[in-house]
C-alpha cells in the first residue's frame, strides 16, 4: 500500500526551511510561475558559482511585452536573512528588481497579493 503524503500544518513550529520552500513553490507552480533554484555561494557546503548572499530562487513568467518576476529568499520560521543576503536584496531593489524574503506561506501570500499578481 502506498504511503499517504504528509500534511504540513503551516502553524506547526517544527517546520524547517525545506517545508516552507515546498509550500511556496507549490503555490507558485500552481499559478504558472517558473521557479528556478539558484545555487548561491555561501559559507556552508561546497564552493558554488554565483554571488555571495544571492536569493534562493528566481521566479519568472512571460508577460506581454516583458518578462515578469522576482527574487525569492526562503528562511525557516523565525529566521531572518544574514547581512550579505540583506545587502544583496537591497542592491537588487536599487536596480529595479523585486525581492522578497519570507519564513512562512502566509506572509508570502500576503506579499504576493500586494504585488497585484
Image (cartoon, helix red, strand yellow):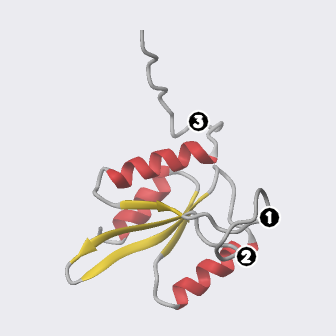
Q: Nearer the viewer, mark 3 or mark 2?
A: 2
- Of residues 94 and 109, the one nearer the viewer is 94
Which-is-in-front pick, marks 3 and 1? Answer: 1
Residue 95 vertical position relative to residue 112 in the rendered view, above or below: below
User: SS at mark 3?
Assistant: loop
Q: Is residue 54 left or right of residue 69?
A: right
Mark 1 vs mark 2: in front: 1
Location of residue 87 in the rendering, given as x and y in whole percent from the top left corner: 68, 81
When asked about the image quadrant of residue 31, the answer is bottom left
Q: In the image, which disc is placed on residue 43?
A: 1
The kind of secondary structure element at disc 1 is loop
Q: Secondary structure at mark 2?
A: helix
Q: Nearer the viewer, residue 117 or 52?
A: 52
Q: How many marks?
A: 3
**Going 46% across and 17% down the picture, which residue do you hit?**
3
63 w.r.t. 30: above or below: below
Report the residue marked by disc 2.
84
Q: Which residue is mark 3?
A: 12
Task: Give the mark nearer the N terminus: 3 vs 1.
Answer: 3
Q: Is residue 12 above or below residue 84?
A: above
Of labels 3 and 2, earlier in sequence is 3
- Residue in the picture at 37% in, 55% down: 28
Q: Are marks 3 and 2 in contact (CB under 8 Å)?
A: no
In the image, taking residue 112 as reference, residue 81 lies left or right, namely: right
Report the residue that reaches farthest toward the left.
64
Amino acid at each position: 500500500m502506498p504511503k499517504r503524503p504528509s500534511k504540513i500544518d503551516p502553524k506547526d513550529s517544527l517546520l524547517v526551511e525545506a517545508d516552507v520552500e515546498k509550500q511556496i513553490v507549490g503555490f507558485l507552480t500552481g499559478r504558472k510561475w517558473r521557479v528556478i533554484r539558484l545555487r548561491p555561494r555561501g559559507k556552508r557546503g561546497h564552493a558554488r558559482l554565483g554571488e555571495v548572499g544571492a536569493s534562493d530562487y528566481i521566479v519568472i513568467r512571460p508577460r506581454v511585452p516583458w518578462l515578469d518576476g522576482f527574487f525569492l529568499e526562503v528562511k525557516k520560521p523565525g529566521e531572518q536573512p544574514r547581512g550579505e543576503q540583506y545587502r544583496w536584496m537591497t542592491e537588487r531593489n536599487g536596480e529595479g528588481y523585486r525581492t522578497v524574503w519570507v519564513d512562512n506561506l502566509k506572509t508570502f501570500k500576503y506579499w504576493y497579493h500586494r504585488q497585484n499578481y
